[in-house]
Amino acid sequence: MKTQCHREGLLAACQLVSAAIPAKDLKPILKNLKAVAGDGRWTLIATDLEVGIRLDVQGLQILEPGEAILPAARLVSILREARDAEVLIQADSDACTVSGTTSPVEFEMASEDPAQFPDFPEFTDERYHEISAGSLREMIRRTSFAAADETARYTMTGVLFELEGDSAKLVATDGRRLALAEGIATSVGGHTTRGFTPIVPKKAMALLERNLADDPEETIKVCIRPNDVLFRTGRAVIYSRLVDGRFPDYRGVIPKKMTTTMTLNPAAFHAAVRQAAIMTDNDGKRVTFSFTPQKLTLRAQGAMAGRSKVELPLSDYDGTPVDINFNPDYLTDMLKILAPDAPLELKLIDAAKPALFRSGEQYSYLVMPLT
């Protein structure tokens, strides 16, 4: 294989694909990227056997077609430090050479047999859902942060996908908060997730988000099968196995009736939460939110840090006073992904029941209070 590549474009592609490389030592060859040059295009491939990506790379000239294994970390370092606008890559099963096209720089690295690199399915299904790239990216941003890092009674280490007809829902929870984002989708060939609960792991969601643009013209194809999922973007195919296990019944968790509703300014509320949280302890973050007519008072007191008190006017709260405690991190995680001028409602029942934040009709965020 021999190709001449635009250095910055190839660097960005390698960094993007490298997100699929395993953090742990599984197989030595998985620390590399596989490059396939042929049919007028160049494709980079990476996988950790659970998640994988094929990315088409632009801005290069194929001088000799073929396949090769490229050492990922060293190649990224070379491309980052090189000063040539174009680089020449020559590789076979024994060695990989990267050289400058205008400067006398050359790097030679050991390579491996590309036939030993594991493969994963192509996107060939005729049943799938189509979702706008911008919409899907926003739905991922609004939910994936709420997924659990560790396995508990239920499987919560990923994002639940529900695709039915012209509706798409993404749900994530760690048992202490729950995020639900809804959007518009188009079913092709009768594709649906009705009857099972496909959970896409957090790593795959992060990789997918990095490949999505806010382009309203680009549509993403999503094919969910019994054990895995495939996403096709404008230039990539992303594969992931689904997380095994049951997702909790999120519909039964969201309260049907809330006694009090108020409107919040996201920017002002976010600032007040951050200010109050300054005086919390790392091992026991807690802020008390005191809702009274026309005013919200936030208080925090740390054993060593001191105390804080922040007041915020409430123009439409006329309910009975309520004191409710929250981990401020759970609120800032949600607030920082909302636009400062986004609509935001807070619905409460009492100090012991979960609070429900709503931004428009398509985003809900449920937070359990601290007791």
Image (spheres, rainbow, N blue to C red):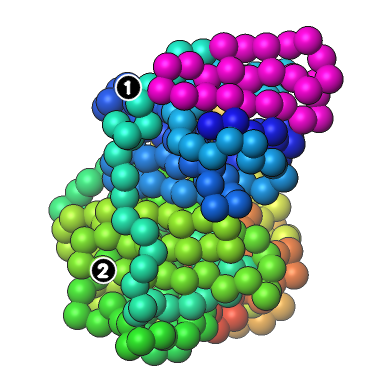
Q: Earlier in the sequence, mark 2 or mark 1?
A: 1
Q: In this rendering, is residue 145 above or below 73?
A: below
Task: Confirm whether the magenta stretch covers residue 98.
Answer: yes
Residue kind at label 2, given as amino acid type: Arg
Q: Is residue 122 visible to us here?
A: yes
Q: Nearer the viewer, residue 325 or 56?
A: 56
Residue at point 59% right, 68% down? 133
Residue 346 position, x and y percent, is 54, 73
Query: In the picture, residue 266 is in which quadrant?
Result: bottom right
Distance between the alpha carbons at the discs numbered 2 and 1: 29 Å
Instruction: State which quadrant residue 259 falls in.
Output: bottom left
136 inside magenta stretch: no
**Which range is magenta?**
82-108
Q: Nearer the viewer, residue 152 or 189?
A: 189
Q: Nearer the viewer, residue 20 or 111?
A: 111
Q: Residue sitting at 59 percent across and 31 percent down? A: 2
Which residue is disc 1 drawn over? 28
Residue 217, position in %: x, y? 67, 75
Give 9 or 169, whichever is nearer the viewer: 9
Q: What residue appears at the point 30 percent right and 39 percent down from the top-left corner?
A: 118
The residue tagged with tag 1: helix, strand or loop?
A: helix
Residue at image mark 2: 225
Residue most extreme to the front: 64
The residue lying at 41 percent from left, 51 percent from top is 204
x, y percentage for residue 310? 68, 51
